[in-house]
Amino acid sequence: MTSSMDMDCERCQCQHEDKHSAILYTLLSQNLSHSPPHQRCLCHQRWTVCLRTPHITCQAASDVLVKTISFMKNLPSFHLLPRGDQLLLLDSCWVPLFLLGLVQETVTFEVMETPAPSMLEKILLDGQSKRQEPEWTQPMLAAVQWLQCSLNTFWSLDLSPKEYAYLKGAILFNPDVPGLTASLYIESLQREAERALQEVVRILHPEDQDRFALILLITSTLKSIPPALITDLFFRPVIGNADIVELIVDMLYEITSWQPAPSPHTAL
């Protein structure tokens, strides 16, 4: 999984658009690092990026999201919870569960720098640009790189299907979510899932005494990924400004039948 971005500072925006800022940065950097100048430039990490093949990646992401919701639907213990607790858990855990699904389904993706409008486009679209620009923000390269690093680390664990299943249960039943009314019961479900995961790890990897703790540690990185990043990167090209959580709730309770439709952003 790679970003396929040109990291060469010959394309550095600060060297071409804001020479005063570049000079100031160079002076300040001399007190921070003695590395070569081309290693100090981090402006590329502030680039906004988009999917290189949104028509393929967004469809794969949508399929993973459907499977994620199906996982919750098929858990009787989840449906025994009060409706309010179900919604709180869903809102809290859909991102790490979705990311775990990306890993399990081996969904890879590449990003590229968000194309800037040409001078001709700016002239022709003058007065219309505000109406045509999306209301959401494009992800930053640095955030996407952190996401890819987290997914790659999880891939290196090479989890078994049972490890995935029990880990998903441990993620879903999080008693620390504020506002839960059945937090004690949810805590017991999480402990049960973690015990089952630990037992599977012990059987499958008896020589690896640290594997269980490592799995939980790396899982915490998935929980640190902001929902806005996942929504903007994988779903905004399809759903536009719709609320992704509302769509997930509809899918979970089958209020509507959501089918990701091609949009002008994803059409070939």
Image: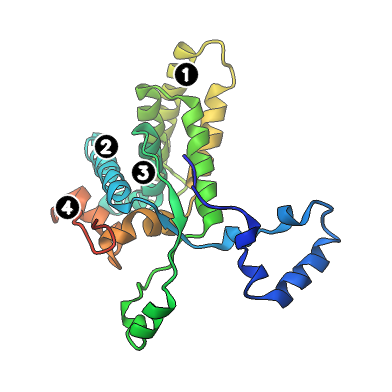
Q: How crowded is mark 4: few (under 14 residues within 10 Å), some or many (20 or more)?
A: few
User: Circle 1 sits in a helix, a strand or a loop, which is it?
Assistant: helix
Mark 2 in CB contact with mark 4 (< 8 angstroms): no
Q: Name the residue under label 4.
A: 259
Reply above or below: 15 against 181.
below
Percent coordinates x, y for residue 143 in the rendering: 53, 54
In the rendered structure, are the residues bearing label 1 and label 3 in contact, judged by CB atoms less than 8 Å apart?
no
Identified at 59% across, 53% down, the residue is 7
- Earlier in the chain: of badge 3 and badge 2, it is 2
Callout 4 amino acid: Gln
Q: What residue type is labelled 2?
A: Phe
Mark 3 → mark 2, Cα distance in angstroms: 11 Å
Who comes first in sequence, dot 2 or dot 4?
2
- Residue drawn at x 52%, y 41% is 150
Secondary structure of the residue carrying tag 3 is: helix
Residue shown at 27% from the left, 59% from the top = 238
Instruction: Give neighbour class at mark 1: few <14, some 14-19, many 20+ (Cα, 10 Å).
Output: many
Sequence-wise, the earlier of marks 1 and 3 is: 3
**Mark closest to the chain's N terminus, 1 or 4:** 1
* Direction front: furthest residue: 120
Residue 28 is marked as none
Q: What residue type is labelled 1?
A: Val
Q: Residue 201, which numbered label?
A: 1
Q: Which label belongs to residue 71?
A: 2
The C terminus - image quarter: bottom left
Marks 2 and 1, how far apart in space?
21 Å
Query: Callout 2: 10 Å neighbours few (<14), some, many (20+)?
Result: some
Q: Name the residue under label 3.
A: 98
Left or right of 145? Residue 91 is left
Q: What is the spatial separation of the Cα atoms under label 3 and label 4, in whole angstroms? A: 17 Å
Seen in the image, is 36 located left or right of residue 17?
right
